[in-house]
Amino acid sequence: MKCIPSSYKTRKPRDKVFGIAKELKKIHREVVQNTTNSVTVVAVLFASIAFLAIFNLPGLYLRDGPKAGKARISNTIAIRVFCLLILQPCSFLLQLSSFR
């Protein structure tokens, strides 16, 4: 009976494990890169929609009179409630996130 060195017996499974680990790291890098790209695209789309919403208020604009160019919704309670309940907490959270 031949005697096989113990280092030879343990080296092959170890090499397989390292190969599998290497492949998993490669797959993980690809997944992270794809996720980053997807999140970036969604963030850009969301920011562009939010930017457009700032300048396009609902209810159109007044065309005649001394208040021409002013948004029709500007004097309503709905826009004031929106500003108080939505915009101020969002700006507060953005300020908090900048203090890292």
Image (cartoon, grey):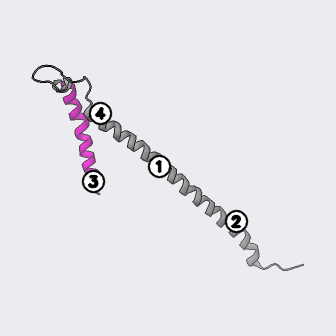
Q: Earlier in the sequence, mark 1 or mark 2?
A: 2
Identify the element where label 2 is drawn: helix
Q: Image point 24% across, 23% down: which residue?
A: 60
**Residue 17 image-quadrant placement:** bottom right
Identify the element where label 1 is drawn: helix
Cα separation between marks 4 and 1: 24 Å
Q: Is residue 45 above or below residue 19?
A: above
Q: Which mark is residue 53?
A: 4
Q: Earlier in the sequence, mark 3 or mark 2?
A: 2
**Residue 75 image-quadrant placement:** top left
Q: Give the residue pinned by disc 2.
A: 16
Identify the element where label 4 is drawn: helix
Q: Image point 25% across, 34% down: which residue?
A: 55
* Of labels 1 and 3, the one closer to you: 1
The type of residue carrying mark 2 is: Lys
- Measured as percent of width and height from the top left, residue 90 is found at 27, 41
Cα separation between marks 4 and 2: 55 Å
The type of residue carrying mark 1 is: Asn
**Label 4 packing within 10 angstroms: few (<14), some (14-19), many (20+):** few
Q: Is residue 25 above or below residue 84?
A: below
- Measured as percent of width and height from the top left, residue 47 is found at 34, 41
The type of residue carrying mark 4 is: Ala
Q: Earlier in the sequence, mark 4 or mark 1?
A: 1
Q: Give the residue pinned by disc 3.
A: 98
Cα separation between marks 1 and 2: 32 Å
Magenta part of the protein: which range? 77-97
Q: Give the residue pinned by disc 1.
A: 37
Q: Horizontally, is 1 left or right of 56 in the view? A: right
**Callouts 3 and 4 close, C-beta under 8 Å:** no
Find the residue positioned furthest to the top: 64
Cα separation between marks 1 and 3: 23 Å
